[in-house]
Image (cartoon, rainbow, N blue to C red):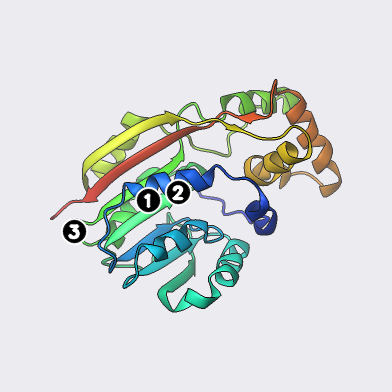
Amino acid sequence: MITVIREWDATTYDALPLPHLRWGRRTLERLPLSGAETVLEAGCGTGRDTAELLDRLPQGRVIAVDGSARMLDRLRAKLADRLDRVDAIQADLTGPLPVTDADAAFSVATFHWIHDHHALFANIARALRPGAPFVADCGGQGNIARVRAALAKVTGEEPEPWHFAGAEETRRRLEAAGFTAVEVALVPDPARLETGEQFESYLATVVLGAQLDRLPAAEHRDFVRAVAAELPEPVVDYVRLEFSARRAGD
């Protein structure tokens, strides 16, 4: 399946109370670093986790890859004083990456937007040196089930812009791509927001973007409110797929 790279409202995205902050910290805690590595960040977004990575890499650098030009523009503005240690690259993670022999790979809240995990993991493996660690977080099996049910009620269709993989299939795909020491877990982690404007803005910017892209702008607000009205409370029922592995060959 072809990966569709979509643009994001990067400014609104950064202004929201994102649970991605704790996901990023949690994922970084699982990444062993000495401080001098070159780290591939797969799906860097606006640079939220890139900044944390740079703090942990005083003698290292980050290769920050994303498919969204707006996200990368925001990253460059946010990290303007540290761009000497960042290579910001716009690329499709399922296509060839201009990266070889990176010392580690890191990703937060990206891979559920990519359907072809076979190509994704094989690409990342090719970008890493033997023995390099790879840690990631993304939406997993059961993620946003209530939101998806609300969407189905509003649209009459089963919404599938995402790929919420299970633990065992992820383990098999990582091993097939050349990773060892694979550890995978599904972790429920719901996010509660304020009723009304904040919840609707969050849904529009973070969750429902793929659906809104197909609608005229004049219909966006009513669509988001209709989905929110189908949910019993302002909660996004996240289930995180967390995994760690090492590139074979160490």
Q: Name the amino acid, label 2.
A: Gly
Q: Quadrant of residue 199?
A: top right
Q: Is residue 10 visible?
A: yes
Residue behind mark 3: 130
Residue at the extreme left of the image, as rendered: 250
Measured as percent of width and height from the top left, residue 182 is found at: 24, 40
- Closer-to-camera residue (151/95): 151
Whether tag 1 and tag 2 are in contact, CB under 8 A, the answer is yes
Q: Sequence order check: which comes first, mark 3 or mark 1? A: 1
Q: Is 138 situated left or right of 149 in this image?
A: left
Q: Is 106 situated left or right of 146 in this image?
A: left
Q: Looking at the rendering, in which quadrant would you find the C terminus? A: bottom left
Q: Residue at x 63, y 55 (%)?
A: 14
Q: Residue at x 68, y 46 (%)?
A: 205
| Image depth: mark 2 or mark 3 in front | 2
Q: Residue at x 43, y 44 (%)?
A: 116
Residue behind mark 1: 28
Residue behind mark 2: 24
Give the Cα separation between the discs numbered 2 and 3: 24 Å
Q: Is residue 158 visible?
A: no
Q: Is 6 situated left or right of 247 in this image?
A: right
Q: Sequence order check: which comes first, mark 2 or mark 3? A: 2
Give the Cα separation between the discs numbered 1 and 2: 6 Å
Q: Name the amino acid, label 1.
A: Leu
Q: Which mark is residue 216?
A: none
